Amino acid sequence: METVLSTVLIGVMLGAQYALLALGFTLIFGILGVVNFAHGSLYMLGGYLAYAAVAKAGVPYPAAVVFATLGTAALGYLFEVWILQRVVDDHLATLILTLGFSQVIITGVTMVFGHEAPRFTFPIVGNVAVGSLFIPQDKLIVFAISAVVICAVYWLVYRTGFGRAMRALSIDRAVAITLGMNARIIFPLTVALSAGLAGLTGSLITPILSLSPHAGESVLITAFVVVILGGLGSVAGATAAAFLVGIIEAFSGVYIGGSLGTLGLFVLVIAILMFRPSGLFGASMRGA
Amino acid sequence: MLIRKRMAAALVAIGAVLGAPGVVAAQECELKLGVVGPFSGGAAQWGIAMRTGVEFAVLEVNSKGGLPVGDKKCHVQTIEVDAKYSAQGAASAANRLASEKVRFVMGPVGSPEVSGIKPVATRYHMLLMLNSYAKNAIGPEWPLAFHVSPGPSGWAAPLVEVAKEKFGMENVVIIAPNDQGGTDIAPVVAKAYEQQGIESTEEYFKRGTANFSPLVARVLDINPDAVDLVSTPTVEAGTLVKQLRQAGFEGPIGKLGGPGTEEIARIAGGMNVLGNYYWFEPVLIDEQTEKMTQRYTELAGSEPPDHTFFYLWAAGTRMVLKAISEAGTIEDTELVAQTLRELPVKDKNLGDGLWIGQKFFGINQELSLPFGMGIIEDGVQQPMIRMPAATGN
C-alpha cells in the first residue's frame, strides 16, 4: 500500500511539472495555431537565466525565477513581433521558424555557458514526512507554485477581458478583429505568456533535475504528448492530461520498468486517442 | 602593366615555395588521416578530446619533418568530419573520406557512429581505430577495425574486485539506457559483479529521460547495497545520483562505463552528494600525462581539453602511425593492420600494454594500456588507483 501511495505521489508531482510546461505549449497553439518547437529550448533558457542570476550575479533564487520568467517572456514577445507575426498563418513557415529559433537558443546558450552542465541546485533540500511517506520539499514547492500558476492561467483565459479576447481571436479571428480586438497586441502577449511559462518551468525544474543546453529536448516531447492527449489548444485538457501522463508514467515506471514501462505510457496514449482522436478536451478553444 | 607585374611576382613566389626541399618532400608523400567523431551536440566533449589527441600525435610527427614511410618522409594531414554521434553521420563521413582517398581513420566514438561507419569503411578497405562499448564493435568480420581501448569485458572485472574490497557490497542494481549503448554494456558489467559473488539486477531507462523518480522508487524497492550507472550519459547520471541520494539511498554508486565525474558531481550538487562513489577512468592522470599536456601546449599553442580521451587517442594515433611507418606503405591497409597486430603495445607516456579481445570479440585487436580507478569516500576524492593493462581474461 505504501508503494502505491508513493507512486501516486510521484505521479502527481510529475503531473504538476508537465502541466506547467504543457500550458504554454497549448496556449500558443490554441490562440495562434502555431506548434512551437522552441518551447523546450525556452524551458532550458529559463533554467540558464535563473542559473546566471544566482551564480553570476548573486541574486536570491526566488528573484532569479522571476527574472527568468520575465526574460523568456520578453524574448517570446520580441520573437512574435519581429518574426512570427509576418507569417503567422503559414503553418509550415511557423514550424520551421520555431525550429530555427530553438536551434539559435541552444547554440547561443552553448556559446555562452559551454556544453557541460553547470552546478545549479534547488536552495531548499530535505523531505517532509506525511505518515510513512517522505515528500521532497523542493518538489512540494514546485507543486504548490504549479497549482497557483495553473489556476492563474485558467482565470486569465476564462475570467478576464484579455482572456475573452484571446479566445475570440482563436475561434474566429476575422469576426474578432471586426469587433475591435487587436491581434497585433494579443498575439505577442500570448507568445510572451507561453514563453514565460516555459521559462518559469525551466527555472523551477532544472535545479531539481539537471541543466544542460539540450535539457529542453526531452521535455518538448513530453509536452507534445500531454497537449495531444489533452486536445491541442485546450487549457483544461492539457492540465488533465498532464496529471494522467504523470500517473501513468509513475505506475508503469515503478511496476513495469525498463522499455516495457516506457511503452506502456505510449500504448495507453494511443488507446485513448483511438477513442477520442481530438484528445480528452479537443478543440474546446481553437476554432479558427 | 601593374597586373602583369603582380602576376610575375606571384609566379616567382610560387616557384620559390615549390623549390623548397621540405615542400617537395611533403608533396611526394602526403598521408591523409581521417578523424571522425561527434564534434557537435551532446557527445561533443568526447569528440573534441579525441580530435585533439589525434592532432597531438600528428603534430609530434610533423614537427620532426614527417612520418618515415619506406625511403620517404610523409607529411601527415588530418581530415576531420563531424559524425554528430549518429550512424548516418558516420556513414556519410566515411563516404566523404573515401572520396578524398583516405585509407586510415581515427574514430569514431560511440556505438551509433561505429555501426554506421563499419559497412562503408569495409567497402573501401579503410583501417579504423575506433571506440565503442558495443558487443560487436570489432570482430573477425571486420579485420581492419581496431579498438583504441578495451570495453568492459576488459576492465570491469578488476574494477569490481577493488570496489568489493572497498565497499563490501553483496548485491547491486545496474542502471543503463535501453538502447545499444546500454544493453550491450550492462550484462557484461553484471557478469563481472556476479563473478565476484555480487548478485546483480539490471534496470533500463529511455535515453533522454529527464526525471527518474519512478525508476528511483523501483530501484529502492529492490533495496540494493550498491547501484552502478555503467554507460549512463553524464547528465542523466548526475540527475540519477541526485535523485537516488535525495530518496535516501546511502550505498556506494559506481560508474563502470566512463569518466565525467566532475560534471556528475556538479549536477548532483557536489562531491559530498556523491558520498561513496567509484568509476572507470580510461587513463590514469599522472606526471606522464602532464608531460603530454605540456608538449601539446608547446606544439599547438593552446591547452588540450581537460578530458582523458585526449591522452587515449594520442596513444592510439601514435600506434597507427608507427604501424604505417613500419609497414612502409600509406596505401595497403591490410599490411598496416597486420603490422599493427604484431606491434608490441608500448606508449612512451602511458606505459606498456598488450593486445586483447580474442576471448570476447574473437579477435585480438583491442589496445589495452594501463588505466585508472577513481574513488570518492565519504565525499572526499581519493588518489586514483593505477590499474595494470587489462588482460581480458
Image (cartoon, rainbow, N blue to C red):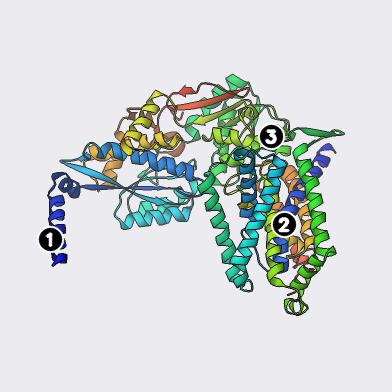
Q: Secondary structure at mark 1?
A: helix
Residue A232 rendering spot, x and y as whole percentages: 73, 65
Q: Amino acid at mark 1?
A: Ala
Q: CA distance from mark 1 to mark 3?
A: 73 Å
Q: Which residue is mark 1?
A: B8
Task: Check chain identity for marks 1 and 3: say if they share one.
Answer: yes
Q: CA distance from mark 2 to mark 3?
A: 27 Å
Query: Nearest the camera: B318 or A3?
Result: B318
Q: Residue at 34% across / 38% down in the picture? A: B301
Amino acid type indicated by mark 3 = Leu
Pointer 1: residues within 10 angstroms few (<14), some, or many (20+)? Answer: few
The location of residue A155, given as percent across then percent down, is 83, 59
**Image height of B384 relative to A38, above or below:** above
- Residues packed near mark 2 inside 10 Å, few (<14), some (14 to 19) or many (20 plus): many
| Image: B168 above or below B70 | above
Residue B377: percent from the left, percent from the top? 60, 22
Q: What is the residue that sits farthest to the top in this orientation?
A: B165
Label 3: which secondary element: helix
Of A134 and B206, nearer the camera is: A134
Q: Is residue B58 left or right of residue A98?
A: left
Residue A22's tag is 2
Q: Against B245, is B85 above or below?
A: below
Instruction: Look at label 2 and name its amino acid.
Output: Ala
Disc 1 sits on a residue from what chain? B
